[in-house]
Amino acid sequence: QVQLVESGGGLVQPGGSLRLSCAASGITFNIYTMAWYRQVPGKQRDLVAAITSGGSTNYADSVKGRFTISRDNAKNTVYLHMNNLKPEDTAAYYCNRNPLPRVPSWGQGTQVTVSS
């Protein structure tokens, strides 16, 4: 079955940086567009960034110029490099396919907290 394991979150001051990683198994990773999503309590899970199998990327307007998504197909891993973090980036971050499968499986996510 599909397994997604996110890591790399933590507490960081405004203006700081983090790199998130997501290791995938149980899927043919290299053929899918992969994405990062984030969710704050009480709100829907939003798309942050996506990367196609060929490496084309797109970003939510709120993170353009600050976040960079990348992937390593040899390692079945997708990354999210986050720079100039803002308090409004505080959320639980998840990875998954994009678009989502009909019945998506989610990992445990990784918490990012931006606070001074």
Image (cartoon, rainbow, N blue to C red):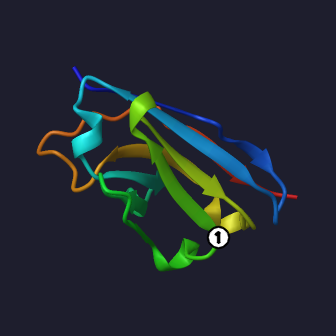
Q: Residue furthest right?
A: 116
x then y, percent, for residue 95:
41, 44
For badge 1, the amino acid type reads Arg
Judge whether residue 76 can be spotted in this image: no
Q: Residue placed at 75% from the left, 67% from the top?
A: 84
Q: Residue furthest top?
A: 1
With respect to residue 6, does 62 lie above or below?
Answer: below
Q: Relative to the observer, which residue lies in front, 50 or 113?
A: 50
Determine the image quadrant of residue 13.
Answer: bottom right
x then y, percent, for residue 30:
28, 40
x then y, percent, for residue 68:
56, 61
Q: How many marks?
A: 1
Task: Check the picture and name the quadrant holding the C terminus.
Answer: bottom right
Q: Relative to the observer, which residue lies in front, 65 or 101?
A: 65
With respect to residue 19, does 74 lie above or below?
Answer: above
With respect to residue 84, does 2 lie above or below?
Answer: above
Left or right of 74? Residue 9 is right
Determine the image quadrant of residue 28.
Answer: top left
Task: Check the picture and name the quadrant holding the N terminus.
Answer: top left
x then y, percent, for residue 74:
41, 31
- Label 1 residue SS: loop
According to the picture, the residue beneath numbered tag 1 turns out to be 66
Q: Residues within 10 Å of mark 1 (few under 14, many from 20)?
A: some
Q: Residue placed at 22% from the left, 50% from the top?
A: 100
Judge whether residue 62 can be spotted in this image: yes
Left or right of 27? Residue 69 is right
Q: Residue furthest bottom?
A: 61
Q: Residue placed at 77% from the left, 45% from the top?
A: 11
Q: Residue placed at 45% from the left, 29% from the top?
A: 75
